[in-house]
Image (spheres, helix red, strand yellow):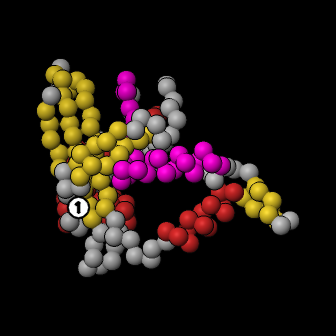
Amino acid sequence: MTEVEPLTGLENIDLPGVGTLEAFYTDGLRTLLRTVKAREMWEKTLRYPGHVEKICLLRDLGFLDGESVEIEGLHIPIKRLTARILERKLYRPKVEDILVMKVEVSGIRGGENKRYTHYLLDRYDKERGITAMARTTAYTATSIAKIMISGVEVGRGIRPPELIGADEKIFKLLLNRLEGHGIKIKSTEGL
């Protein structure tokens, strides 16, 4: 396994309905590293252009360091001080966010080269005051819970989401429930 530093691998990506975002390596693979066998696998976070430059500046200047700094006899953790300052300047009680996710998988299926792309774009629900992040995470979790309650077997014990979603029946049930909440995942298949 090859490890890379977070905030590296910077690239600009044009996404339908959004425009240009920058993408960079982060650590979101979690259980996928153990449950999926793949030659290559990575996760990148998407942000508006300029994000990485600003975060790297804070990091390089020491604002994200793990130690404390002494100020007038008080030992204050640097990260907490930075967080408090940024919170004062950047806090917005109402966040009208967007969530974009693109998953690309390529490999051999049934003896043929295949490529699958799944694209999700969700926006803040103004009518209900629910962020896109809350919608896509909470509705997914509650949908799986409701599928389980309906009697569909999803396996025993704690199961990572990718193993539950690998079951085509469960995946289709999940997509239908999400669409009921206005969350649509566009899927394409090609070479």
**Which is nearer the eye, 83 or 120?**
83
Residue beneath the point at 63% across and 48% down: 61
Highlighted magenta segment, given as a residue range: 38-62
Q: Is residue 68 above or below residue 135?
A: above
172 over 43 or under it: above or below? below
Between 26 and 77, the residue placed more toward the observer is: 77
Q: Which residue is mark 1?
A: 183
Residue at image position (27%, 65%) is 123
Disc 1, SS: loop
Neighbor class of circle 1 (other Cα within 10 Å; few <14, some 14-19, many 20+) is many
- Measured as percent of width and height from the top left, residue 163 is found at 36, 42
Residue 180 visible to an observer of this rendering: yes
Residue 139 visible in the picture:
no
Q: Is residue 172 above or below residue 32?
A: below
What is the three-letter code of the residue carrying label 1?
Ile
Instruction: Give the residue at the far right of this rendering.
Output: 73
Horizontal relation, residue 55 to residue 120: left or right: right
Q: Nearer the viewer, residue 142 or 147?
A: 142
